[in-house]
Amino acid sequence: MKRKIEALSREEKAILAGIRLSVTAHLVAEVAAVDKDLAVLCKAPFTLSLAAAGVPGRAKLICRDGAISVWFGDRHGDELGASTKGAAGGMLLFPNARACARSLAGGRGVIIPLPFGIAFPRALRFFKAAASRAPALLRSPDLPPTIKARLLLAATVHGLSAVAGDSWLEKRMHHFPDGIAQVVAGDALFLLEKKGRMIRVLENEPNGRSDAAALRIPDAILTFSSPESAIAVLSGKRQAVVALGAGEVTIAGLLSLIQGLFSVLDRLSWYLGVGVGEDEK
Amino acid sequence: MNASSERFAKSQEYFERAARVIPGGIYGSKSPGFLVPGHFPYYLSSASGCRIKDVDGNEFIDYLCGYGSQIVGYGNPEVDRRALAQIAVGDLLNQPHPVMVELAERLVGSVSGMDWAVFSKNGSDMTTLATSLAMAETGKQIVIAAEDAYHGATNWCSSNVFPVFASEEQRNIAYFQYNDIAGLEALFARHRGKIACVILTPYHHPTFKPQLMPSPDFFPTVERLCATEGAYFIMDDIRANYRLDAAGSHVRFDAHPQMVTMGKAMANGYPLSVLLGTKDLAVTASGFFITGTYWMSGAPMLAAMATLDEIERLGGVPRLEKLGAILKEGLESLGAAAGFGARVSGPLAIPYLTFDEDPNLYFNQRFCAAMADRGIFIHPHHNWFISLALTEKDLEITLDAARGSFAQMAAERQSFRAGPPR
Ligand SMILES: Cc1ncc(COP(=O)(O)O)c(C=O)c1O
């Protein structure tokens, strides 16, 4: 049954907004890495936070040396990076979770710009351009499948990470084992660490922080046989079970970890299916 | 299409069609992802003795036995003769067939310590009925069970983890680790005065993990704690029945449950399960509304009578264990010779292979895939079952395939993407 955002609990609204914040931030960072026009906007450093009132999760984009890295967590987390002089930008604050979910799903919504430093104008210019470029790029038939697969995979793994703390999932998260899962599609590879009620994406951490856990042999591996199969599954055009049965996806190792992550993915899909406003984008 | 998908082209075609009209295509434990897709069929069309055939015409020597039910062989002529004769003259009637009385008498006479029997179709029906009876009889709500034990697909015990079930049906189930006496004592202390029953399998048979036999002081402790609490001890023998002891697997371990659930092997694949209980529960059981449209059909009960005869005629547990021992010794020694820590755990008639060096089961998946490529159906994630239809010759073929599979794995070992796991 499709839910409307009004029917969600306070916590669910916050989770939904958190998912949108994290996925958007990571997606624009990925897109910036492959899009020439956006690359131009990343020449000078900046930081930009994305947050919504009443939502603990916030995202921070950190542009340094022409590349964007992303931090996502609650406001008490160890916000990384951005000590570069002259890089302080500011924050885009959504007045509430609903506005955040709706705006970041492509609908209308109010955003309050909060400049903190001189880099704010360029941060804003970048974000506006990137936020509209990402969905356009994903829709474009000219986008090479390897890149599209990588973008969709990035959105999925960061979505999983953002939804994991949902209390609806608490029992489920305890029900499957901890461990590291590797997800591969073409040359895109992500490592996810599941520990207790948390899912962390180990790859692409800001500051090039290399994580000891990332060097371990993964406990389970999920491989898409081609970027095309990844795109079909991750965009919802092909059921994961069918792709699995057809050999377009293979799973190996600690199966219960993969099964558990699939069940978290179900919850993520549920959130992404929530109706967010009159245009229901 | 690669070679393996050509081998299972029809299976895959059916699966694609299925996914359009059946949620998940094939749901539950038969889902392709639980095996190794590309190496196993998804749809089977026929079987005979210990051999199964898939929709593409591939044949396998089978070590899963329809998840345990086929104990005297697929299409056992004597079982089928008696069941099919009844089907020809009426299977499901308004009232029970007299064989129900005969079967109840036979089970009460043979399963140690039991005074009455009621029948249904699935194991889950019976584990649910048993725990419900214990709750009704004691007026208490807590059910104690072992972590990772399987007692069925009903909400109270299933792996369907949704908050709405957690706050209701699953709220009163307390878990401890199988064999962990201190953990069990702690649960009894925590829930004193509220415990209706303890439900346990005769040995621990989790998926994905080595199987665990009960420690010598485990069941005596369970019985002592239950007696003090005034709680019932239910033995869920659904997976193991008739493969450990004809008088019930509890006899094997000198345990004394007040209720025993059986299913699977008891009717060689015809749908039938049973709950047996002691006298003191008979009044509550007789006051319980126990029914299902198909629960009293006669043919499966006739099949059960024939199955029990056939188990005896074909050598029963000793014969199963002889076959199981050949398999265990063969696999472990062939594995060791190829440099692998292959270990077969569980009872001889219900074995399961794991690799000491690989708790994540990468090796299991490779080995079982290699075996399936060679026409042997063994499961990478679920325990196997020995059938009385197996012969020494079948085992020879199986172990030949194992030799080839281990050699293939040894040759590939360097190139394993995952490397030798931690
Ligand atoms: C120990 C045990 N209990 C209960 C069940 C549930 O039986 P069914 O699948 O017939 O409902 C099973 C099935 O595997 C089982 O192994």
Image (spheres, helix red, strand yellow):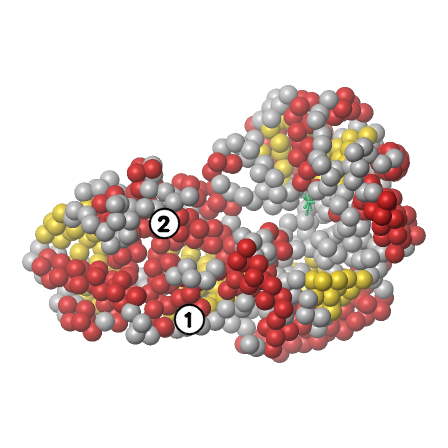
Quadrant containing ligand 1: top right
Query: Where residue A105 appears, x then y in whole percent?
Result: 27, 53
Q: Quadrant of the N terminus of chain A?
A: top left
Query: Where residue B138 appears, x then y in whole percent?
Result: 67, 22
Residues marked 2 and 1, same chain: yes
Query: Where residue B416 appears, x then y in whole percent?
Result: 54, 73
Residue at horizontal 59 percent and vertical 36 percent from the top? B156
Residue at horizontal 88 percent and vertical 48 percent from the top? B85
Of mark 2 and mark 1, the one earlier in the sequence is: 1
Circle 2 sits in a helix, a strand or a loop, which is it? loop
Q: In this view, does B421 lie above or below B292?
A: below
Residue with the mark numbered 2: A273
Q: Residue A228 bears which disc, if any?
A: 1
Q: Mark 2 lies on which chain?
A: A
What's the amino acid at mark 1? Answer: Glu
What's the amino acid at mark 2? Answer: Gly
Q: Mark 1 lies on which chain?
A: A
Residue at horizontal 25 percent and vertical 49 percent from the top? A279
A137 sits to left or right of A237: left
The extreme right residue here reads B313
Cβ of mark 2 under 8 A from ligand 1: no
